[in-house]
Each structure stands twice: as structure tokens, then as C-alpha cells.
Image: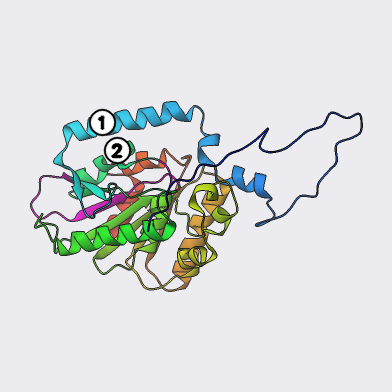
């Protein structure tokens, strides 16, 4: 069941009292939580929006590009795959009958953003002859990680079974996602309807997420960290492209590299794509290009 929002009261300056004194402030030892990092360092290691100049302006630009894509593309908006308000998807058509489906799961650390923010990235797959499914899902703190993982599984089941006769049954599904969506892609790459996967800047180890400020809303349990960290459960799945920008935060680059390496060591068909000079958000510019590195790599390993 989804969690209800709970109000939290804070008093003072982050509940800390500072007393003026002529004595030197007391020094507290640094508590190492993960790979040599304390809480503050972990926060900085994963907060992508803090390292992008004027992120609000960048988000507004992405939203404007997405609005243009919606105006130009044909398709259907806000189709339902479940009873929850956010269990919706957009189906954008490339104009070819029975085209394969390219499912895209947006990021936002499982707690921010919406499918409408990143729809512009669909222009690349559409030009490549895919119909694009833009997935929405319930965000934390209303939903737990278990809920979110289950919702994406329900979407894939819905597309494969096509209970409402939309025409999605028997079409190959190429699953993709960015950041948190890259994580959900890695979790579901073994779904029987998925024939290939594109995991962009994936967060495949949830342990550091559970130890930093991102967990304030997620409230990950130890069981969820273990069960839903794809790096800990590399097994048979669809051929997969793992992509990351070379200019992203080092922890995101490391996670993508570690996952690609682990999959390759397990005998999985993996292509690791580094995107030169690209940071966490402009990696989607590459996806928006039909001849971009990610779609080119996906075509090299994906059945159609």
C-alpha cells in the first residue's frame, strides 16, 4: 500500500542550537558511511541538480522542448495501466504499423519529475521507427520502492497482455530509462516481454541512496536495498546498453561502470557507452538524436 504523506516539524536551525561562546567550537568526528564518505559527502555525491548551473532554467527548457514534441507527434495521452492516479502512459506513434515499442521511464530519484518533463527525448526513437511509450508512476513518499518497482512491472504486463485491446500485444518491447528510470530498467530487463534494454545513468546500488538525503522521502528498508539493487542480482536478461555521461558525478559514472562490468563478467550481452563531455541531464540530448550513440548501440544488440 502507498504511504501517506506525513508532515514533519523542524524547530530552530535544523533542530540544532548554537550558543555564542568565546571558546573554540567542539569538533565532532566524521562518521564514514560509504566508500570513505560521510553524510554530507554522500549528499554532494548524488545531488545532480546542485552541480548544474541554473537547473530551474534547464528544466524549463526541457519542458518546453517536450511540449513541442507533444504538439508535433501523433499519439494518445494518459492511457491507464492501473487504478492509481499516476499509473498512466503516453503512446506516441512513429507512423509505421505494428512498430516495436520503446518504453521510456523518467528519472527524478523516484520522488521528482514527470513523463512530460523529458518527452523531448522520444524524438530519437520515433525517428528510428519505434512507437514510444512514456511511462508515469507514483512517486515517493506516497509510494515505496516496492510499490514503484511493482508499478513498472504492471505496466510491462499491461503492454504485453493488452487487456484493453490497444494493439500493444506481441510487439517487442525495448525498455529504457534515465537515472531512477535507469534503475527501474535494470530491475526489469529480465521481464519476458523485454527484448532489449537501455539503462542510462542507472542507480544500480541503493545502499548509498539509503544513507543520504535522498532517503528522507524514499525511506528504503534493508530488504528493499538488497532486493532492488540490480548490481547485487546480475542474472540472465535482455541484451542491454549501459550509458553514462563522462561529465556526470563520479558516483554515477562508477555505478554505471560497475554494473556494466558485472553484467559482462556474468556473460550477459552488454554494451557500455560513455558519452564524452555530457552531464546528467544533457545525456538525453543524445537519446533525442536518431543517430546518437545510445540508439546506435541499442540497434547493434537489439532484435527488431
Q: Are marks 2 and 1 in contact (CB under 8 Å)?
A: yes
Q: Which residue is mark 2?
A: 116
Most foreground residue, 267 or 23: 23
Q: Is residue 42 above or below residue 265?
A: above
Most foreground residue, 48 or 199: 48
> Which residue is drawn at the image coordinates 49% and 67% (left, top)?
262
The dominant secondary structure in magenta is loop
Q: For residue 101: magenta?
A: yes
Horizontal arrangement in the rendering, residue 262 relative to residue 115 (left or right): right
First in residue order: circle 2 vs circle 1:
1
Query: Could you tell me how far apart the alpha carbons at marks 2 and 1 are, in whole angstroms?
Result: 8 Å
Q: Is residue 201 above or below residue 163?
A: above
Q: Which residues are magenta?
A: 92-112
Q: Quadrant of the N terminus?
A: bottom left
Q: Which residue is mark 1?
A: 67
Most foreground residue, 192 or 141: 141
Amino acid at each position: 500500500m502507498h504511504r501517506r504523506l506525513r508532515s514533519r516539524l523542524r524547530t530552530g536551525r535544523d533542530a540544532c542550537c548554537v550558543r555564542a561562546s568565546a571558546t573554540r567550537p567542539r569538533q565532532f568526528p566524521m562518521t564514514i558511511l560509504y566508500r570513505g564518505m560521510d553524510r554530507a559527502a554522500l549528499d554532494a555525491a548524488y545531488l545532480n541538480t546542485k552541480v548544474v548551473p541554473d537547473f530551474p532554467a534547464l528544466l524549463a527548457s526541457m519542458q518546453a522542448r517536450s511540449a513541442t514534441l507533444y504538439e508535433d507527434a501523433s499519439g494518445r495521452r494518459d492511457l491507464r495501466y492501473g487504478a492509481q492516479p499516476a499509473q498512466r502512459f503516453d503512446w506516441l506513434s512513429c507512423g509505421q504499423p505494428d512498430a516495436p515499442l520503446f518504453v521510456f521511464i523518467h528519472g527524478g530519484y523516484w520522488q521528482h519529475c514527470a513523463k512530460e518533463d523529458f518527452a523531448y527525448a522520444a524524438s530519437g526513437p520515433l525517428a528510428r521507427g519505434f512507437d514510444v511509450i512514456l511511462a508515469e508512476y507514483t512517486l515517493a513518499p506516497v509510494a515505496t520502492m516496492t510499490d514503484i518497482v511493482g508499478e513498472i512491472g504492471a505496466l510491462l504486463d499491461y503492454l504485453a497482455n493488452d487487456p484493453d485491446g490497444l494493439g500493444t500485444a506481441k510487439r517487442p518491447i525495448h525498455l529504457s530509462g534515465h537515472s531512477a528510470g535507469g534503475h527501474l530498467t535494470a530491475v526489469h530487463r529480465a521481464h519476458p516481454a523485454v527484448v532489449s534494454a537501455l539503462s542510462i545513468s542507472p542507480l544500480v546500488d541503493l545502499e548509498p541512496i539509503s544513507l543520504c538525503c535522498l532517503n528522507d522521502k524514499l525511506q528504503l528498508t534493508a530488504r528493499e536495498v538488497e532486493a532492488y539493487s540490480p548490481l547485487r542480482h546480475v542474472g540472465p536478461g535482455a541484451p542491454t546498453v549501459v550509458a553514462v555521461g563522462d561529465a556526470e558525478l563520479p558516483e554515477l559514472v562508477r555505478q554505471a561502470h560497475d554494473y556494466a562490468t558485472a553484467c559482462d563478467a556474468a556473460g550477459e550481452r552488454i554494451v557500455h557507452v560513455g558519452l564524452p563531455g555530457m552531464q546528467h541531464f544533457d545525456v538525453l540530448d543524445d537519446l533525442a538524436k536518431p543517430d546518437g550513440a545510445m540508439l546506435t548501440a541499442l540497434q547493434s544488440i537489439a532484435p527488431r
